[in-house]
Image (cartoon, helix red, strand yellow):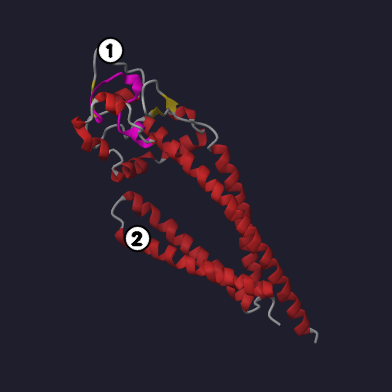
Amino acid sequence: MVKVSNNLLGLLNIATFLISIPILAGGIWLSRQANTECERFLEKPVIALGVFVMLVSLAGLIGSCCRVTWLLWVYLLVMFLLIVLLFCFTIFAFVVTNKGAGEALSGKGYKEYRLGDYSHWLQKRVNNNWGRIGSCLQDSKICQKLIDDGSNTAADDFYKEHLSALQSGCCKPSNDCNFEYVSPTNWTKTPTSSLINPDCNTWSNDPKTLCYSCQSCKAGLLDNIKTDWKKVAILNIIFLVFLIIVYSVGCCAFRNNREDNSWKRYP
């Protein structure tokens, strides 16, 4: 007699197997179309994720529907480890994103971001990989809109702009510098300019340089990471509940397999 838990587990794994196909196809497409460092960086994790989901789904599908007990045992072991890892990552994500926030400026629509305000662990990871990250940011052309606006944007209008964390940190000099505004990406030093902040010396009006090497640019990226990781952590909680349900169904199917094997062994 076919058990409900085996059928349900089989259906769930058919769904995840189908999901793995576009993931794997997307990774292969990236590997062939990649033109930038960012795209090349993404291709291997995407392919690995697609292959992992496909193999785990096949193990669960064959183990539950074909009553292969050892394969179902492997499937449950992988699921258990995945639940533990996901739980640990979710807790870790909330801990490392607990620190840091943009500093509101009087009379400005945008905020300023300082690297030292964020988690030391995230700072270290960003500093160690900034060569690749900086290249990705330049390829993404986050400052292009400000460059295109050029002299069409008056100073008062620019100061009211609600810039993103990356635009604020990478596309303009720090407010500490007290540079004179010419255009959103063109600023000049004045006798009252301050160079106490090291970003003031790093800033360049060259559209290819701007403040991509500034500490504020790294801080802007960390603020984005903080926001994204919190969203991912919330989604992880939902996914974790789903995995626990699937794991429970898998345990029932595993028990059914063992009972059937015992029945066949001792008629």
Residue located farthest toward the bottom when viewing the structure as drawn:
267
Residue located farthest toward the top when viewing the structure as drawn:
191
If you read the primary sequence from the N terminus, does the residue marked by circle 1 or circle 2 appear first? 2
Instruction: Say what secondary structure mark 1 lies in.
Output: loop
Q: For the residue marked with disc 2, what is the amino acid?
A: Ser
Check whether the beta carbons of the residues at disc 1 and disc 2 lie within 8 A of each other.
no
The crowd level at tag 1 (other Cα within 10 Å; few <14, some 14-19, many 20+) is few
Front residue of 3/126: it is: 3
Q: Position of residue 78 (x, y in %)?
A: 61, 62
Report the disc number at residue 103: none
Q: Position of residue 224 (x, y in %)?
A: 43, 39
Q: Quadrant of residue 111?
A: top left
Front residue of 109/243: it is: 109
Q: Quadrant of residue 192?
A: top left
List the residue tagged with mark 2: 31
What residue lies at 46% left-to-right and 35% top-to-bottom? 123
Q: For the residue marked with disc 1, what is the amino acid?
A: Thr
Magenta span of residues: 166-185
Residue 132 seen in the current view? yes
Q: Position of residue 259 (x, y in %)?
A: 76, 76
List the residue tagged with mark 1: 192
In the picture, which quadrant includes the N terminus?
A: bottom right
Question: Magenta includes 169?
Answer: yes
What residue lies at 72% left-to-right and 74% top-to-bottom? 256
- In the rendered structure, the answer to whether residue 252 lies left or right of residue 197 reads right
Residue 71 seen in the current view? no
